Structure formats: C-alpha cells, structure tokens
Amino acid sequence: MKRWWLATALVAVVAGATRLGAAAIMVDSNLGMYQRVGGISGNLNSIGSDTLNNLMAFWVEGFAKHYPNVKIQVEGKGSTTAPPALISGTSQLGPMSRPMKASEIDAFEKKYGYKPTAIGVALDALGVYVNKDNPIQSLSIEQVDGIFSSTRACGGQNIARWDQLGLAGEWAQPVSLYGRNSASGTYGYFKEHALCKGDYKGTVKEQPGSATVIEGVTNDRYAIGYSGMGYLTAGVRLVPIAPQGSTKTYEATADNVYAGTYPLSRYLYIYVNKAPGQPLDPLVKQFILYVLSQEGQEVVVKDGFVPLVKDIVDVELKKLE
C-alpha cells in the first residue's frame, strides 16, 4: 500500500528531531512559533469532518487567544459535507479525513475554474478498536476485511464469531460491529484501505460520530469498531494490524505512522479556496499558519493525533503562497 507522504527527508527528521512511539509524542522543535499580526478580524465557518471536530475546536480556542474578536463556527458532520460547503461559500475551511474525490474536485473546479487547495494539518492512524477486556492480540487486514465486509475483496474468509479468531470460553460469541455512516471520510477510507474497496456487512451499526463508535465498543463487550487514534479511551483497546499479505503486525503508534508501516495511516486535511496566483484570504491564511505552527501542532498532540514535522510543514506552507 502506497505511503505517499513519506520522503527521505522525513525519515531523517524522525530519526533526529522527533523521537516518538511508546514515549510521549513531541512536537518538532524546528517548527516556528505562531506570530500574531495586525489587521485580522472577521468570521469564519468550518464545515466537514467529524474526526477533526475536536481538533478544530481546540485550534479555534487557541487562535482566539491571539485574535479574541475573530469568530469561527465549527460544524463536524462528516467529510462529505466539506466540498459542497466550500463550493457554495457557506464555509471557508473544509476539514476532511480523506482526500477529496475526483467528482468533488470537478464540481469545485466547474464553479471556480481551479481546484481546491488541500492543506495537510496532521497525521492519523485509523485504529481498529475492541473492548478493553477483549484478549485478541492482533488482526491482519484480511481478517479485518472478513469481519467487516460482505464481499471480502482483500481475500479473507467470513468472520462472524470471536471463536473463529481463536478466542474460547466466554469469548465464543458473535462479533458485534460498529462503524461510521457514509457521510464520513473515515467510512470511505476504511472501505478503501481495510476492505479493499469492498462492501460493508449490513450488520455494521453505523454511528454519526467517532466518539459514538468508541462508546459503542466500550459498552458492548463483544464489539469491534474503527475510529481515529485520537479517540482512544480507557474503555477500549487498539489492536495491532498486519498489512495485507504480511504476518508482521504493527501498532497504531506515531513511529509506525511516520515510517508508513502501520497499514491504516492517513493525512488529515483542511481544504481551502485559493485562486492560483492570488493571495489567500488573510483570516483564513492566519488560521492555517497557526495550525501549522509549533503551537498548533502541540494541539494535535493534545488531541491524540500525530503532529507534522518541519519538512512536511514546509511543503504545506508553500501551498499558501
């Protein structure tokens, strides 16, 4: 599976400036601190991803400390809601937990004559969660596919009970499935990368938000679900995953996200409307600069996701020019 964000420079940075993993995640000290500027005022709307909902709220709170008169309203009902809101102009910030689809980009370009700009703002490991008491040690992508998919395009066998995965005794029970609804970018990403673009089983209990997936798995002893790594709580456990065709498992850690070895690693984005050769709206630009600053990336760590390193941030900043 292609880890398209990886670059030689990034590997070098991870080896030096940021030592992550089991230890506390540290923000790259080479990132610049946010510098407040004058003349910034107004209102912004953010419509999009539920996965980024908490992140956006934290960023808005931090940004308000620099600009107390700026008002930013955040609505997180799923990544699918971001493109039409940007196209219609009802939002200026479009958080998404997946890249825009070609059809969404085409619709934007049809109206404006240019493509939307995707700003990578954080990294995430889409986690497979079980109840904290569940003893399962690991799963392969083929097994995850067999659990969640009716078509099993990854080549796995149908799995409907925990004893099919080697659990015995009280765990010889049917598997209870929790997932996101189709408006979610997480739903789409999991479908593409964990189900090899196959179909979900009709028994998946579709939830409106990431937190409700975790709540379901917490309260349902025999449940399994998927959600971003930032939603980990004491009631659930992240299961190490083996990539398709491999027996080596990887935990959902920052090290494995950076290295590209965890098979469900992804970027989180904020899409903006920026005409080529034209300056970005000053308020939008300053918010993105805040998000990509050391202060903004500390918020990423606070919310349980993986911060960007300077080499990635430098690439993202060039998109604002």
Image: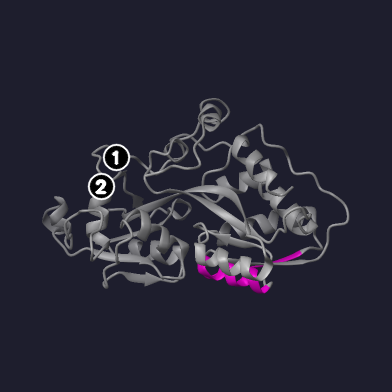
The numbered mark, 1 or 2, whose residue comes first in the sequence reads 2
Range covered by the magenta-colored residues: 71-88
Horizontal and vertical percent position of residue 304:
51, 49
Residue under numbered circle 1: 249
Left-right relation of 204 to 23: left
**Count of marks overlaid on the render:** 2
Residue 162, horizontal then vertical, whole percent: 17, 57
Was residue 86 drawn as part of the magenta stretch in this picture? yes
Report crowding for label 1: few under 14, some 14 to 19, many 20 or more residues within 10 A (C-alpha): some
Kindly indicate the quadrant of the structure image that contains residue 109: bottom right
Quote the CA–CA distance across marks 1 and 2: 7 Å
State the residue position of label 2.
Answer: 140
Q: What residue type is labelled 1?
A: Thr
Q: What residue sits 13% from the left and 59% below the top?
A: 172
Q: Which residue is drawn at the image coordinates 18% and 63% (left, top)?
A: 160
Q: Is residue 200 above or below residue 124?
A: below
The reply to whether residue 167 is in sight is yes
Displayed quadrant of residue 182: bottom left
| Quarter the N terminus occupies | top left
Say which residue appears at 62% left-offset and 44% top-offset: 298
The residue under label 2 is which amino acid type?
Ser
